[in-house]
Each structure stands twice: as C-alpha cells, then as structure tokens.
Amino acid sequence: MLDKQYQAQVHEKNIYQLWLKHDCFNPDSEINQKLRAKIKNNDAFTIIMPPPNANDPLHVGHAMFVSLEDSMVRFARMQGKDTTWIPGTDHAGIETQFVFEKKLKKDGQSRFNFDRDTLYQMIWEYVKTNSDIAVDQIKQLGASADWSRFKFTLDKDIVDSVLNTFIQMNQDQLIYRTNRLVNYCPKCGTAFSNLEVNHQEQDSTLYYIKYGPFVLATTRPETKFGDTALAVHPEDKRYQKYIGQDIEIEDLLGTRKLRVIADTFVDPEFGTGVVKITPYHDFNDFEAWQRHKDELPPPIQTIDFNGKLTTIAGPYAGLKALVAREQVVKDLESKGLLVKVDKNYHNNISVCYRCSNPIEPLPLPQFYIKVKSLTQAVLKKLDQKEVKVLGAGHDKILRHWLKQLEDWNISRQIVWGIRLPIWYEVDKNHDMMVTFIKADKSRVSGPLGELLQIHSLQEIESGLQNISASVTAEYIISKTKPGENYLQETDTFDTWFSSSQWPFVTLMNNQEGDFQRFYPTTIMETAYDILMFWVMRMLMMGIYKTGQVPFSTVYLHGLIRDSKGQKMSKSKGNVVNPMEISEKYGTDALRMALIIRSSPGLDKSVSEGDFKAMRNFTNKIWNASRFILLNKEAAVGENKETLENIDESIKKSKELVFKEKLTQITQEITRNLNALQLGIAADTVYNEFWHWFCDECIEDAKKGFIDQELIINGLVIFLKLLHPFMPFVTEALWQELYQQNLVSDSILASSPWPLS
RNA sequence: GGACAAUUAGCUCAGUUGGUUAGAGCGCACGAUUCACAUUCGUGAGGUCACAGGUUCGAGUCCUGUAUUGUCCACCA
C-alpha cells in the first residue's frame, strides 16, 4: 500500500520514464492519436521552447518557463489538441565564448593564441561535453517536451536555413555593409547592437580647454587628436563671425587648423556653446560630420580596437584611453591650455552588457539589416490583433520599440557562431588586413598583399584568425567556397539573428509537414527581459520569411525574486537553485510555488516557505488519495451502523451539491487555463482541493453522506485538474488507481480533460 | 526628459467584462490529535484596498490628478 508520506525522489524518475516509454510527449504516438480520436479536437497547439544556452545549468528563470509552458502543454494535450512542445538549445554566441575565454585565461591562455577554426573546434567540444546538463535538468523539471523534435541552433540544417534567410534578405535589398560607428567593447573584442549596451550614471569631470579663440568643454580630452571641426549653434550670437572660418589652434602636437561649422545639435546653453567634432569616437559627432562632410576633412581614428591611442596621437600612442586622458590633461595644464576643471559633473556612459566595461564608439565596417519594412509589418499585425502580448503593459513597450528601432548590426567579431557567408576574392582585396597563426604558433598580421609575398594563401587560410576588409572591399555571398582564391569573412552572426528565426527553422527542418501542421505556433512564453532581443525580432523575421506571425500569443512571465522582493544575484547570495529545490521538496512543489498566483509581466518573489507549503500540498494530495483507496479496501461493514442511520434526504442533497460544485470548479479552472490565467487556475485548484474536497467532502464521506463511488470520481477529476501543474504526484496516484481498475486510461498525461 | 508598470493583512502576493461579508501562503495567538495526512486538524486576531476628486443604484476594480517605488528608453560635448 501507499507510503504514509509522498516521497518525490522515489517516484519522479520512474514516472518520467513511464511517460517516455509510452511516448506521451509526441503528438504522433499511439496513445496521443487514440486520445485525439476520442475527443475529436482538430486544433493544433504548439509552443517553441526558448532554447537555453547549451552548456548552462538551469536557474530559477528556466524553472519558471518550464513550469508555465509545461502546464499549458499538458492542458492542451489533455484537451485532445494536436500538441507539440519543441525543445532545443542555443549556442549563445558571445555568452558561451565569454565563459570559454574565462576558462582559457585560467589555463594561462587567450583566444588570440588560436586560429579561428581551432578555437571553434575547442568551444564545440566544450559545449558538447556540457550540453546535456540543460536537457537533463529540463527533464527533471517534468517537461513534457517533444524530444523527437529536438534542435540545436548549430545543427547543419538549422544553419543552412539561417544562411538562406540571409541570402534572401540580401536579394530583397534588406542587407547592407557600411562603415559607421559601432558599440565596440575592447574587452570582449566585438561590436554589439544598441540593445546590448547598458547605460550607467557616473561622476565625471568636465574639462574646459582652450581651442584658439574659443574655450570648449569636453569629458574626453584624449580624443582631441581626432578632431576634424568645431561646431556652434547657427544662431549663437557669440560665434557668428567664426562660422565657416578655419581657425588656427595651438595643440599638444603643434598648431593646426579646424573649420567652424554651424549645427543645430549644439546646445548653446551647455558649457561654452562650442563643441569639438570627433567623428570616429562619438555618435553625435559622426552624424554631425556626415551632415557637413563636403566641407570637412575625413575622420581620424585615434583609439584602436584595444582601447589604446593610435599613432596619430604621437607620444600618447599605445596608452589606454583613460591613462592618456590623465596625461593629456596634465600636458594641457602645463601649456596653459586648460582653463577650468568641473569635477561635479554627472553623465551616463555606455557599458558592455556582458562585462560592464566602457563601450568605445569605433568605426567598423559591418553588415546591417534594414529594419523599417520589418517593423512596419509587425506593427500592422499587432494592429490587426494577429498577435497579442500578455504582460502588464509590455505590449506598449514593444510598440514603442518598433516605432523607433534603428538598423540592426548583425556582425560580431567572435568565433563561436554562424560565420557570415561572405567571401572576398584575394586578388581584388590585397589591402585587406589579415591576422593568422603560423605553424610555429606565432601571430602574423598585415595587409593581405604583403603577407602573400611571404606566405602561401593556404598557410594564411589554415591559420586564419581575423580579416578586416575595408568598406569598399568587394565580396560575394555564397553558402560554399566560391573558388580557390577566396577568403571567408571571419565575423559571425549575432546570436539573435539565428534565434529570431527559431520558430520557423525548427519546424521547417523537422518532420515532414510539421511547418504546415504547427505554424504559426500558439504561444511564445518567455521572460519579459528578452522581449526586444528575441520576441520582437522573431516577429520581424517570422513575418518576413513566412508572411505570418510566428505565434499568436506572447505570454511574458516576470522575474523571480527573493522573499524580500530583491533581485537574485550571486553576490547577494540569495539565488534559488531550482534543482536543489526539486530534490529537497519535489518538482511538483517547485512548479506549483512558481506558478500559483503568478501574473504575466509581473515579478514574483518566492521563499523557502513557499516551496515547503507546496510540498505539504503535494503530501495532502497523496494522503487524500491514500485515504480514499484505503477506505475502499476496508470492509464496508465497518461503517455499517453509521450508514444505516444516515438521513437519506440529507445524503441526496449533499451528493447533488457535490456534483454541481465539482462541475463548476472544473469549468472555472478550464476557463482560467483557456484564458492563460495559470496563476488563478492554480490558486483555485489548490483551495478547492484542500479546503473543499478534503476538508468538507472527505469528511462528509466519512460520515456516509457521500458515496464511495462519487468521492472516487471527485478524486479522479481533481487529479486531472491538478496534473498540468503537478504532473508527478498526480501521475503516481493515477497509476495506483489504474492498478485497481478504478480508471480506464493507462496514463494520466494522455487522458482526456474533464468535460472535454 | 519620455514611456510603462506597481501601491490590497506584519511579510510576499492573488483578486480580467464593476455586484453579497476583499482572499491565499508564510508569520502570529489559542486549542486538538492513537481514528488518511504533525508535511495534520479546529478557532481566532489582523485590511478607511497609497492619497484626493469624479462616473455609477453600487468602485479594490472604470476616469482624472497627486505621491511613492520599480523597470525600460533617451540624453549636452
């Protein structure tokens, strides 16, 4: 007979194996086809799982999405829908490379010791070794994912589809390559899109420097070697006579002339109303330069990709920007060019979202996607309500973004990712800067033409580390090497370029007919913090490629916070490890604690007490079932006396109320689940099971007011209602009922939802 | 500077077409218990639903404004 307490650890693994054995998660399995034939529900139900990083252990956010999505999927499956939940993992370009480089550093190495193919292979091995972690943990959380349709973002067929999309976009003239300022992180060694830059407020210093007849204010005096002009507001009376003039200024490296231009972007109120224009190191300056480029010299790069000053800066060359700043200020002061120093200045600086080091705006030729037509299409679909967003106002944030999104830089200077299908013909691009690793492991760098005089193309190619082609370089786009005399671009795609195609590439490269059968998918469930990175771009790319929205509903869950509502972080030591909770209190308790009373778009705090409470609930379900089964086995004669003495009319009316309320509860929970109000549905089933079914009905049954058969029927229905949230304990009990021939369906997970 | 949310019991939060006496978990107080479950059961305390107006027969729920907190975005060198 059943234990006195429910031991989650004892049952969970066996139950999961049981589901796998019956292929319960596959819509094409016998058991699910039978179920659908019985219910005759023709709807398809699809969720594409947000692919976790292939080699990351799961955190509580993952547990949240697994809990929510699995509940949705299990409910749909029991409703007889053609249900698939497609799992996968993501190569997570920069994230993974970042982790791997840390590991290299530990071993006293860096990525610059390896050619790109070797490095790629090393990361591949590393990811492969760790990649089962996430998958195993997702299974431990009870995910009823369709493992027969599993995909990895670097699977051959997926990569091929992603490249096809790029080629198609190029044909549609949505791709261009240009040299403009990018957000470059010298520490990470790659450019980022605007979305990957954070802003941090900081105390800063504003330096007032003499520039010929002017004094101007700047926070970055070290960029002055890259000045190409001075700017004033066109209506600033103080400076009218200088506009259009070339002004001679005394500088640290001698004297030189700068043109004074008039541009409305200058705020006459700020500083002295004069601005130096340093186009290659400031976004505003670059734009100003472009507006006036007919009368100005070309921009000068004074900071390189390592964050150090270039040879343009003479004696300051090779110094890191911040070091150079101190030195420049000191020298300006001794030359009498420093007028004033304002140390009480606050401004925002851009920092890398990954490593929090300052972002340098630097000029780099990159590939961009023109987003205008894509965002317009998404806005239209939003207006037509073909896609709706659940999540506390985040739909408005999405619209706001779509209206002002800038073109998307998709080039990344990292190895771990899908390499751009761009090929440079060697003979036409001798000026290309190339870096490669020689057989003796030494690193060689220079213009391709010069390198070819000493090294063979084959030697260069096999040790290739990095190519930097000028913006005018000729290239062709091809998935395969177009000929002997070509070198492939070393940049890779932004991870989000491939993951934005995830809904359709997973379905197009799966079983025959899957795309027609499951696209557009039903729900995209993910955390709100990747709304712009991922959801927005999936909408853009999905509509572009298929003409249809990739999903009709977006369900955004909030962040999980600690008991005090604080964000979880390693440094605070308040991180909840879902795997530990699962082992300690059971997966069902973990899932229920996360879902109950949660609301889309809003953060939720959880504490040890919540998990404990839900573990107690698991045990309550167990014991109520245990009691009902025990009672059934016990000789009816034991209660004979009571049974004979009960008032039949009271019994009849109690039983009627019981049946009615059971139906009403079922309807309410079904309605809430259909409306994706999982937090409410979970709360309802919790309360009704414990405080109505157990506290009242089972007590009545003890007294003989409710028949054995009826109470068993109530239990069966409650197990079904509870199953989406707490799959393990309910299935374990179901198996017990099945053994005793109290139910006919062999597996709860593939049994019909009540009233369907 | 702009946008989006949140504000309900000591704490953390539900409460979605406006409708009896506003709910849960944890915590608290008192009590019970060989009879499924101490991971239990019973009883109880605790709320002018941020504030101020408005709409309505009726407002935690809708509207306007204010305050506070949080998030996102932008930004002046």
Image (cartoon, rainbow, N blue to C red):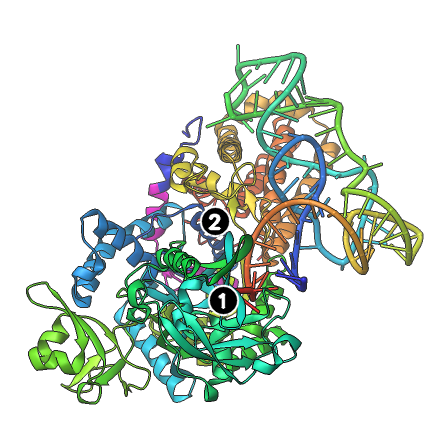
Disc 2 marks which amino acid? Met
Residue A739 position, x and y percent, is: 40, 40
Residue A718 vertical position relative to residue A395 in the rendered view, above or below: above
Question: Circle 2 — which element?
Answer: helix
Residue B70 in the image: x percent, y percent?
A: 59, 48
Residue visible at 33% across and 42% down in the picture:
A14
State whether residue A473 appears in this view.
Answer: yes
Please state, as top left, top right, bottom left or bottom right, where the C terminus of chain A lies in the image: bottom right
Residues drawn in magenta: A13-39
Mark 1, chain letter? A
In the image, taking residue A455 as reference, residue A110 lies left or right, namely right
Mark 2, mark 1: which one is toward the viewer?
Answer: 1
Q: Quadrant of residue A252?
A: bottom left
Quarter of the picture holding the N terminus of chain A: top left
Q: Residues within 10 Å of mark 2 (few under 14, many from 20)?
A: many
Label 1, secondary structure: give it: strand
Q: Would residue A260 appear left or right of A433 to someone viewing this image? A: right
Q: Chain of mark 2?
A: A
Residue underneath mark 1: A210
What mark, if any, has residue A64 been given in the picture? 2
Badge 1 amino acid = Lys
Between B22 and A537, the one lying in front of the other is A537
Where residue A384 appears, as percent x and y from the top left, is 63, 76
The quadrant holding residue B13 is: top right
Residue A475's tag is none
Residue A607 location, x and y as percent? 51, 35
The question of residue A466 being in magenta is answered with: no
